[in-house]
Amino acid sequence: MLIANVFMTCAWYGHLRFNTGKLALPLIILISWGIALLEYCFQVPANRIGFEQNGGPFNLWQLKVIQEAITLIVFTLFTVLLFKTQRFTYNHLIGFGFLMLAVYFIFRK
């Protein structure tokens, strides 16, 4: 799931970091789709392997909340490292904390 999220974050937000002003929007979309295809090559098998009905340890709710938590971590690192003008503030930390509480409650028996 981690590798898949890296690809998806690059597909969705990478073009905002790099000077793509000379490229037509349809071409940027096609490039992003190509990157997203790599994301699916990792995410779909991870979900199939991890799903409890396929012998994995997680139900659908748990798979989704794991994916969202990983997405937040990857997105935060991506933003802080590549977009130097974007600041990580306390309100972001508090919001992420509440989302991590969701992870706790989803996994609570």
Image (cartoon, rainbow, N blue to C red):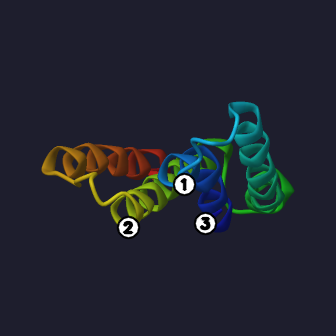
Cα distance in 3D space between marks 3 and 1: 10 Å
Kindly identify the amino acid type of the residue bearing the numbered disc 3: Leu
What's the residue at 65%, 49% (across, down)?
11
SS label for mark 1: helix
Residue type (three-letter) at the residue carrying disc 2? Leu
Left or right: residue 104 compared with residue 43 = left
Residue appearing at x 44%, y 61% in the figure: 78
* Disc 1: CA contacts within 10 A as few (<14), some (14-19) or many (>=20): some
Count numbered badges in the picture. 3
Q: Nearer the viewer, residue 79 or 30?
A: 30
Compared to 57, does 69 lie above or below?
A: above
User: What residue is shown at x 26% (from left), y 43% (from top)?
Assistant: 95
Give 79 or 70, whichever is nearer the viewer.
79
Q: Earlier in the sequence, mark 2 or mark 1?
A: 1
Horizontal and vertical percent position of residue 5: 61, 57
Residue 97 x %, y %: 27, 50
Q: What residue is disc 2 on?
A: 81
Reply above or below: 55 against 32.
Answer: below
